Amino acid sequence: MRAYLGAILMAGTALSGMTLSGAALAQSSSPFSGLFGRGSQAEGPVALDVQVAGGDEALTRQIRQALLLTGALAEDRTTGQDMLAAARGDYARILGLLYDEGYYDGVVTITLDGVEAAEVAPLDAPAQVARVLVAVDPGPIFRFSRAQIAPVAPGSDISDAYAVGEVAGTGVMRRAAIAGVDGWRLAGHAKADVGDQQIVADHDASQVDSRIALTPGPRVSFGRMSVSGNQRLNERRLRKIAGFPEGQQFDPEELETVRQRLRRSGVFSAITLQEADEIGPGDTLDVDLTVVEQAPRRIGVGAEISTVDGALLSAYWMHRNLLGGGERLRIDGRIKDIGSETSDRDDELTIRLDRPATITADTTAYTELEVAKMREEDYEEDSATLGFGLTHIFSDRLTADAALEYQYSRVFDANGRTDFKVVALPMDVIWDRRDQPNNARRGFYLSAEVTPFAGQGDTSSGVRALGEGRVFRSFGADDRFTLAGRARAGSVFGSALETTPRNYLFYSGGGGTVRGHPYQSLGVEQIQGPDGPIKTGGLSVASATAEFRFQVRERIGLVAFADYGQVWTQDGFGGDSGDHTGAGVGIRYDTPIGPLRFDVAGPVSGDTGSGVQLYLGLGQAF
């Protein structure tokens, strides 16, 4: 027996060869009318039983998860009408699932209290159903006797599963066709499509003969981009931000890049890029861009609590598209160490104006002013920093930043008053390969900062360097277990400790470095004042963190962690040093914007902390 398997690649329609007990779905009337007496079943929970011949547990689990019956029971929709409607729809769902897995001779029965659901008219539904039985005999699995797709563009990512001898699931064929079309589109053939398909199942041999013919069409280049939907944003600036590659060879990835640039601007709530239906003169393809602008203003608040460091409160106000060219003005305020046991309250205010698409579509220029009033345990500092910089996005994973800034700070400590003045050129690069920034399960994150600075007056000159790496690895069913590690090292070269700006020095301790020890509790006592040594930060630092994360339930996770930090008095990790270690456990509750974090930590070594500290925040510790 040979059955033609038509039109399955894109539509996934039913194929011949599947047997439904009862032959066909009932229409408006049924000879089985009256088999269910109204109210004939006692009210109570519905028992759902899924049985698959051969005992394939994986297939049984797939079928159960795909059933409309399963969803109805989970939502407590258990009336007879609900059960009948779900059961009648599940014939097609099971059929499609079996075809995807390469079974074309299956037999499916779904009975409600022993009566085949397909043979019950919708108006004859029972009042109640006590037991639903889904019985599936998948039959033999079919394999490819031929798996041909042509012509194929160089570099196309056709799965190895589409090959002679492999399981001939419709999903495999569908994915092969899509990959073939995508390969031609990546090569510039925007209108590539499936031209023909000949798919025949030999039920006697349990084999499938599959031939897919692709039609590449001509290679095209980008034509013009029409724009609509922008109201406050100037169209010239919109086009500059989009960076549409008019005249270049068509590449669907370039369209995604345009979409990302527009999304990064923060101006739009919706972005639609629609390719023209027809190829234009000279083998060009026009694109229609439609945007919906967001409300121009936005506010946000945040909080974090530590039993030793106190509370941190933050808020921001943002204005999108300030001058009609996509500019973004953001004002951030932060108050920390509220109620701290080791220091007084710190206040910070930052005003920043960003202008996207400056120089290139992927370069953002910014101006930033930051003022701060810090009241630490051993010193007080008032500072102001004004900077002008550029951020360039090489890809959604790799970014770089460079700025020119002037910083003035006035420090009061046991040695009296000291003024620091520097002109600096901070530069940094970030390579982020994490799967999720707020709750990474796999991937890595690397960052490097280099800041040459020229001191004015009695302030030293030198170079500050800092590097950090994070790595994440998950394993187990559904990635329930995650190992996470972070290492950080930095040093200030060519500058004397006493004449280096305090915010360039390194400390350890607190939620961002070593939990279980107070914030910035580990520094050095190197500067001599009238009353003895003055505690400051060091010229070098190194820290490491290891975490083991365990997802207990869908939204609840547990964490065990250990942190280590060390600070040196000299550059290049030389001179005297001190270190400390902390460890603890935590709980995470997943929210739409990241996990809510609650950690309990205590000191393991070092003399900078005592007792237990509690930390509450949003997002993983790193």
Image (spheres, rainbow, N blue to C red):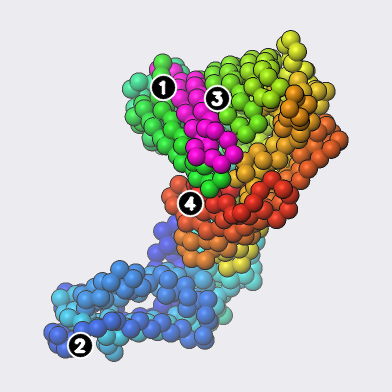
Residue 354 position in % (x across, y down): 51, 22
Q: Earlier in the sequence, mark 3 or mark 1?
A: 1
Closer to the camera: disc 4 or disc 2?
4
Closer to the camera: disc 3 or disc 1?
3
Which mark, by number, is residue 321?
1
Q: Earlier in the sequence, mark 2 or mark 3?
A: 2
Closer to the camera: disc 1 or disc 4?
4
Q: Tell which residue pokes out farthest to the right in this image.
A: 575
Tell me: residue 136, above or below residue 345: below
Q: How many numbered marks, from 0 up?
A: 4
The local crowd at label 2, few if under 14, some if 14 to 19, many if 20 or more residues have their Cα within 10 Å, is few
Q: What residue type is disc 2 on?
A: Ala
The local crowd at label 4, few if under 14, some if 14 to 19, many if 20 or more residues have their Cα within 10 Å, is some
Q: Label 2 to label 3, Cα distance in Å? A: 73 Å
Task: Decide which of 579, 389 is in the foreground and name it.
Answer: 579
Q: What residue type is disc 1 on?
A: Asn
Which mark, by number, is residue 596?
4
Q: Is residue 234 magenta?
A: no
